[in-house]
Image: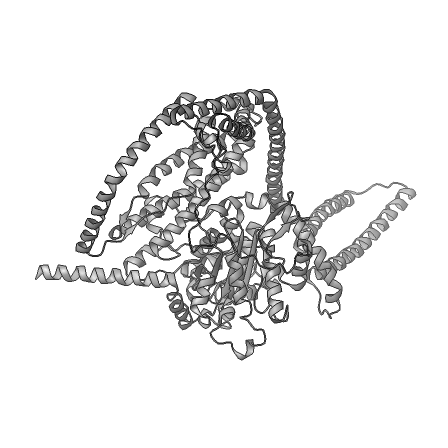
Amino acid sequence: MSEGAYQRLWESSHVTLQELLDQEQPLLEPVPDRERQSFQYRLASLYLHYLGLLRRFDTVYDQMVQPQKRRLLRRLLDGVAGRVLELKDELVHADLCENHCLDRVLQDLKLTPADLEVPIPKYFLLEQSTTVRERGLILAEILSRLEPVSSQKSVTGMHRTEAIILVQKAERARQGRLRATFMQEIRRDEEQDRRIQEDGWHKFSQGQAAVTIQKVWKGYLQRKCTQQDRRMEMEFIGMLPSPNQVEHLSIISQARLVEDVRRLRQMEKEEEFRAAMVKAHDSLVETEGPDMKEKMKEQIRQWFIECHDLTGRFPDYPDASSGGSYSIFADKTPEQVRMELEMQVQENRKKEQEKSKEKGKDEKEKKKGKEEKAKKGEVDAVLQVLPSKFIPRICAGHEEYLNTWKNRCESIHPSQNYDSETLREEKRKEVELEIRIQVDELMRQELRNLRLAVDKEEERPLRAPKKTPGKKTGKKKEKDLTSDRSVESLYEELVISGLLRKSESVALKDYIGDFLYLGSTLSLAKKLPMPSLFDIRQNVALYAVLRLGSPDIHIMAPLIRSILLVGPSGMGKKMLVKAVCTETGANLFDLSPENLLGKYPGRNGTQMMVHIVFKDETEYAAPPWGAVTQFTLRCEVARLLQPSVIWIGSAEKNFYKKIPKEDKEMDPKRIKKDLTKALRLLTPGDRVMLIGTTSRPQLAEMRGLCRVYERILFMPRPDYASRYVLWKRMIEARGIQPTQHLDISALAKVSDGYTPGHILQAIQSVLSERRFLQLSKRPLVASEFLGQLVKLDPVYREEEESLKDWYFKTPLGKKSMKHRVDQLEAEEAKLDKEKKKRK
């Protein structure tokens, strides 16, 4: 797509955005609980539309070059992403569950399940690619120091890469020997021809001439066939790429080249724009600054005089925290300020007269209201969406687009340079604010002098805000156990001790699963739909990736500090943790009980360990991995290195009801109190998330587990659709295209009860290198995988039912079950009434 195509996509996105903003106001009106289904439908529809808008804004922001448009698009992109998170939170409160049956809404809106996929903005990784790269170098350098210790261990066997290199060397030697023999024969033939020529030319007969021509032609054909066979052989052993791979690689390299050029252009334009911002600021301060200062002084002096004429006293000057004089003269002329002052005086007199009358009326109305409520009984519950924090930001961005960019002729800036007029307007506002702060300081002193000279009184002290009893104004400051340690030394200690690990690169899209197509049908049939693997991937993207990826989104979005992944072994819980780290460039802290065994022993050791990970009152000196500013901030080491993921495997062990004998040595509950205390320190803007994984939550104390983990995501066995996609994608990932001989549908049916880990294990066992070579003669069939599946233990129904029973004892599970029971009772009561009417 060209630049103009993305410009049109941006314009159409704002048309859609305007339609969505029009739907926001009706959503704030309360709805009776009996209209819950229509309320859920409206929420789901708005949620899907915002998802599509997020996908479009991400595409346009990634492709746009003009720096001013990119800044506006970034604000809109973060605002829409935050609104998606708010709507997700509202859907959870309305549906009373983490997964939502949106198949009917998708069908009505004529969308596909692909439109339900949560887009992860590309700038998450692009903006901190340098940080991630430098952090990787630091990790590699620290781990390289530990290699001499690990090299002492006896290593058996040979790595696959080394074996391939050894085979390739032997193959080159064999081919070299064959080539030497072949060249020796050629030289022998040439020697014979030379001797014949020296003896003299002789005439060939017709038969001899024909034989000579045949020999030459057959030699040519044989050389051509040999060259083709040699190429096929080299392709087979991996020393040459196949023609299809060459074409594919050329397309990919060309696309990457275009992308790299675009990234360079974006960086160049951004640097030009920053230089122009500094230049425009200095120019405005020099040329327009003195006039602005004098005009502000004159305006404020006029306000002093008018207030003194009306009230007989000079006014109190607004504090800097409330905006100073800007709060009085924001977009107002002196005449308007004078009119407002006169209106305020009159209103104050009227209010004093009406206060006494209203007191008596209010008391009577309160008594009447209480009596009416007592007569009616219980009031019907209502459903209502909370006011959004992101809508004002989205509206401001939309207004800026309409006022600045909608009707702008793009032919003026074909090279995507910044717009100087728009830049000067923006900088003029900044310069006005800077000058106003200076003017406010001068005018406060002038006001003091006027009071002393005219009213003969000193400055009236500002009233301090009243303190509410029972509330503490600040948090208790804890002792810093590592005040003399730098962030770099703590980072190195965490790596050496194994608490900070290098995460494997896993994309979230690699967590394969399909959409739940029969969710609404199951709900109508009074059956509780379980989340699919698609729902799990979507929830992880919403709760973890979107929040950790952007500081602006994290500050304003509903705060979620921890999530717990609950499901049988082999469901890919650890893979999801790695995917969150990969998609956001986050650090991975491993506080699993098994990993803490023998590290930081004793109570003091536990406090020190948690303190290093959650360090308080730390002065942040820019570490070598990409920070450019220095600031003091109350935060943890994880916050200093944010985004960060703190992973606890076997999370139930921290909250054991009764510690088993085999786990007493590791003391799994030792970090329970310190972990709970540290989590409370996390505030909006601290991109740190605790992710726990467990397959046996029944062993844990329910209350403590649910207090630490704010969101609990249940991961049941994959359904038929997900199993079908798993078999197909995993076989294709091995480089094999399924044929008609392979019945994937049959495999999906017989693998009911098996997890994605079981399916992957079966595929790896069957598709060995030897079997891969036999595919051309003997295609794959479904029966080959059955023998491997039989060797694996599936997730039995009793185990899954036990996990379901536990989940429905969680706070959200209890609400869901209670609501479901209430619905069934209401429907039964309705049927009974209809039966009585018929009788």
Whether residue 759 is visible: no
Left or right position of 479 against 191? left
Left or right position of 572 against 42? right
Residue 323: image location, x then y, percent: 48, 34
Q: Nearer the viewer, residue 226 or 491?
A: 491
Residue 446: image location, x then y, percent: 53, 27
Q: Nearer the viewer, residue 92 or 673?
A: 673
Left or right position of 609 against 44? right
Task: Name the residue rendered at 54%, 36% in the picture.
Answer: 63
Colouring chosen for the image of the structure:
one colour
Task: Name the residue rendered at 67%, 60% in the picture.
Answer: 493
Q: Quadrant of the C terminus?
A: bottom left
Q: Residue furthest right?
A: 198
Q: Residue furthest bottom?
A: 661
Residue 753 falls in which quadrant of the image?
bottom left
Left or right position of 198 against 334? right
Q: Nearer the viewer, residue 670 or 642?
A: 670
Residue 653: image location, x then y, percent: 51, 70
Residue 276: image location, x then y, percent: 61, 27
Whether residue 833 is visible: yes
Q: Residue furthest front?
A: 456
Image height of 331 relative to 587, above or below = above
Image height of 796 relative to 371, above or below = below
Q: Tag count in the figure?
A: 0
